Amino acid sequence: MSSDEVPQPAAPTPSRREQNKAATRQAIADAALNLLRGKGPGNFTVEDIAEAAGISRRTFFNYFSSTEAALASVTNGFLDHALRQFRLRPAEEPILESARAALMQLADPMTVAPMAELFTLTQQNSSLVRSELEAWDHCTEQIIIAAKERVAKTPGAAIDELYLRALAGSVISCGKAAMDVWFAQCGADLSPASLSVLRQLLIDAIGHLGAGFASPAHSSTATPFKDRL
């Protein structure tokens, strides 16, 4: 069994209430993304999202503070998925290897499709870009928390705050860099082939970090996507 094929404990079954809340939250996020596709940034309101999701305005605000927050939840969902995979990795595994393995677990390129689409649709809107950055910053804090939990499980290990924060920030910066390079290469292309490129860029970025950013002799991401078709 490879290091990327670790048996994962069964997740506890959520209660009916938790399932309903998750479904409502997802419906709001889906409605917001659909409106963004159809109307463009800044051309729809909370009321529009609530109507499309089949909920009241008050219910919307039980879940999100703004249209930007509802859209940012798409990115948060992907990052939360990656964090869940990270937490399932063996406690003795190097943190960078766990981060890479967590991304590998997102095997289906379509897993990254909503986040990728949101990225392509929000680049010209400063408010939405800021919300996206806040989602990545939130993930940085969650990585630090998860890493501290892991260290706490290791007998005799001490928490190095500087190391953990520098590492978490570097991991997130690698993720951002992968998104930027993918968008520069592929633009708004959301085909399975393009999304496979994005997934590989995310993995390669973590690989560069793990290698200490040694200059690679041959980079799998050096050739523009359009030239590989």
Image: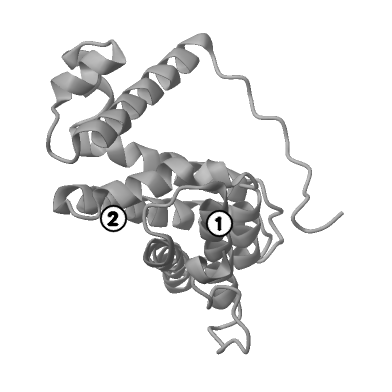
Q: Residue at x 63, y 84 (%)?
A: 218
**Position of the C terminus by quadrant:** bottom right
Depth check: give the residue in front, 60 or 222. Answer: 222
Where's residue 182, x and y in %? 44, 63
Can you tell which of label 1 and label 2 is closer to the viewer?
A: 1
Q: Secondary structure at mark 2?
A: helix
**Residue 109: numbered disc:** none
What amino acid type is highlighted by mark number 1?
Arg
Where's residue 11, x and y in %? 65, 29
**Position of the N terminus by quadrant:** bottom right
Q: Secondary structure at mark 1?
A: helix
Depth check: give the residue in front, 208 or 110. Answer: 110
Where's residue 20, x and y in %? 44, 13
- Give above or below for 205 relative to 22: below
Q: Residues within 10 Å of mark 1 (few under 14, many from 20)?
A: many
- 70 horizontally vs 186: left or right: left
Q: Residues within 10 Å of mark 2 (few under 14, many from 20)?
A: some
Distance between the alpha carbons at the discs numbered 1 and 2: 19 Å
Closer to the N terminus: mark 1 or mark 2?
2
Which residue in the structure is indicated by mark 1? 199
Where's residue 107, x and y in %? 65, 47
Q: Residue at x 68, y 51 (%)?
A: 89
Q: How is the image coloured?
A: one colour
What amino acid type is highlighted by mark number 2?
Leu
Which residue in the structure is indicated by mark 2? 133
Q: Residue at x 13, y 27 (%)?
A: 45
- Give above or below for 83 relative to 25: below
Q: Residue at x 66, y 57 (%)?
A: 101
Residue 157 visible from this viewpoint: no
